[in-house]
């Protein structure tokens, strides 16, 4: 998938030892300063417990240089070239669960979107509800907690009264956790 001026899209994860989501904008500005002069664009920074995720547009040949320039922020944890791909439903669900449980919420969204594209009717809405919960957490990682909490209303509407299990996902638990998080006006990490 081409993204900006024929650049490729990457998610770059650096190890995080001290930052919290409130630092996301400061980290974003610092990262842009560190790569000044490069032909690259860092769209945003998301702060998870153990890593900082950068959403980047860059030519593949320049990825290593970008990672080196970002090293004052943290050591490399993971690089993922984001390309649109078709995925089997079972694999998309497996990947989505892994990403959600490892705070890689944007990747969770992408994995479940691949599942969503292959679903119909009520199943499509259920999967969209799971996607919205993941996106809520991605917003929290960008220090947009209020947006994340607000998204839970839409997520709950999509989850509706769907069956309590979807493959190996406890949908009832997601519903309960979403309601609890709305009540405390905060997002609290949990696994699916």
Image: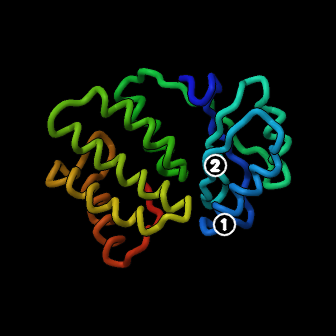
The image quadrant that residue 6 belongs to is top right
Q: Position of residue 40 (x, y in %)?
A: 72, 36
In the rendered image, which residue does mark 1 sit on? Answer: 23
Please tell me which residue lies in front, 191 or 123: 123
The structure residue drawn at horizontal position 50% and vertical position 62%, both measured from the top left corner, is 140
Q: Position of residue 119 (x, y in %)?
A: 24, 30
The image quadrant that residue 182 belongs to is bottom left
Above or below: residue 182 compared with residue 96 = below
Above or below: residue 105 compared with residue 121 = below
Instruction: State how far apart marks 1 and 2 are (Cα).
Output: 12 Å
Above or below: residue 3 compared with residue 72 = above
SS for dot 1: helix
Q: Position of residue 36 (x, y in %)?
A: 82, 44
The structure residue drawn at horizontal position 65% and vertical position 34%, both measured from the top left corner, is 57
Task: Give the residue at the far bottom of this rendering.
Answer: 184
The structure residue drawn at horizontal position 72% and vertical position 57%, both measured from the top left corner, is 29
SS for dot 2: strand
How packed is label 1: few (under 14 Cα within 10 Å), some, or many (20 or more)?
some
The structure residue drawn at horizontal position 37% and vertical position 54%, both measured from the top left corner, is 133
Residue 68's disc number? none
Residue 53's disc number? 2
């Amino acid at each position: 998938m081409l993204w900006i001026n024929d650049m490729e899209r990457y998610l770059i994860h650096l190890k995080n030892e001290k930052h919290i989501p409130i630092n996301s904008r400061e980290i974003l500005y610092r990262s842009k300063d560190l790569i000044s002069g490069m032909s690259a664009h860092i769209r945003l920074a998301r702060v998870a417990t153990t890593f900082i995720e950068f959403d980047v547009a860059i030519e593949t040949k320049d990825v290593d240089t970008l990672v080196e320039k970002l090293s004052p922020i943290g050591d490399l944890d993971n690089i993922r070239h984001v390309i649109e791909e078709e995925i089997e439903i079972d694999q998309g669900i497996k990947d989505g669960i892994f990403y959600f449980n490892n705070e890689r919420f944007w990747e969770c969204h992408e994995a479940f979107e691949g599942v969503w594209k292959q679903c119909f009717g009520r199943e499509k809405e259920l999967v969209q509800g799971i996607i919205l919960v993941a996106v809520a957490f991605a917003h929290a990682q960008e220090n947009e907690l209020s947006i994340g909490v607000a998204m839970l209303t839409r997520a709950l509407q999509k989850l509706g009264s769907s069956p309590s299990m979807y493959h190996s996902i406890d949908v009832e638990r997601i519903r309960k956790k979403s309601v609890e998080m709305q009540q405390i006006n905060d997002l609290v990490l949990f696994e699916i």
